[in-house]
Image (spheres, rainbow, N blue to C red):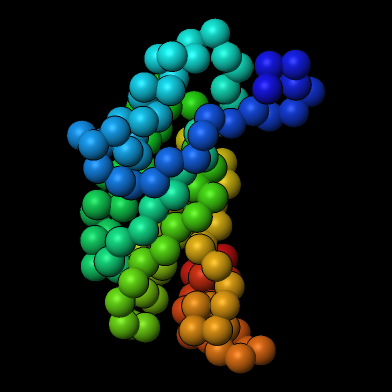
Amino acid sequence: MQPYAGKAKLGAPAVTNGDPASGMGLGYLSSFLHSCSDCTIDFIPIHWYDQATNIQYFKDHITQAHTAGGNRSLWITEFGASGTTAEQQTFLDTVLPWLDAQDFVERYAYFMVGDGTMVTGTSINAIGQTFAFSSA
């Protein structure tokens, strides 16, 4: 990676919200950053998956990832919340404006566009509508 430093943005390995005590998620990220202290890391990519009702857990995890990443910018390259359509819409209506207000969140993308997730058949569904227009 290092030959590309300054020519492209370089990210750490993407981690999920897996249990840090088991060496996953932010535990792995911390270990990697410690082991690669001379590496150029411009941003921290993360993934998050859980229940749509766990809004505070989402916010806490994003904030903890920023800290664990040495206060680097975050790219949330995948996040997904399971639950009813109404629960997922409430989740998105709550977290998208919050993400937009965090100066350390540089990018984010919902997990997957597929039948039942953001679209039904070839049409955008209620969750897709919420994602597309919630933070507008």
Say left or right for 4 vs 127: right
Quadrant showing the N terminus:
top right
- Count of numbered tags: 0
The reply, left or right, for residue 120 in relation to residue 95 is right
In the image, 136 versus 26, the foreground residue is 26
Q: Is residue 5 left or right of residue 102?
A: right
**Residue 77 visible (yes or no):** yes
Q: Is residue 32 above or below residue 14?
A: above
Residue lying at 39% horizontally and 53% vertically, measured from the top left: 48
Q: Quadrant of residue 40?
A: top right
The picture places residue 62, in percent across and down from the top left corner, at 36, 43
Residue at x-position 29% and y-position 33%: 23
Q: Residue at x 37, y 83 (%)?
A: 85
Task: Classify residue 40 as left or right of residue 49.
Answer: right
Percent position (x, y) of residue 30? 36, 24
**94 or 110: nearer the viewer:** 110
**Which residue is farthest top?**
38
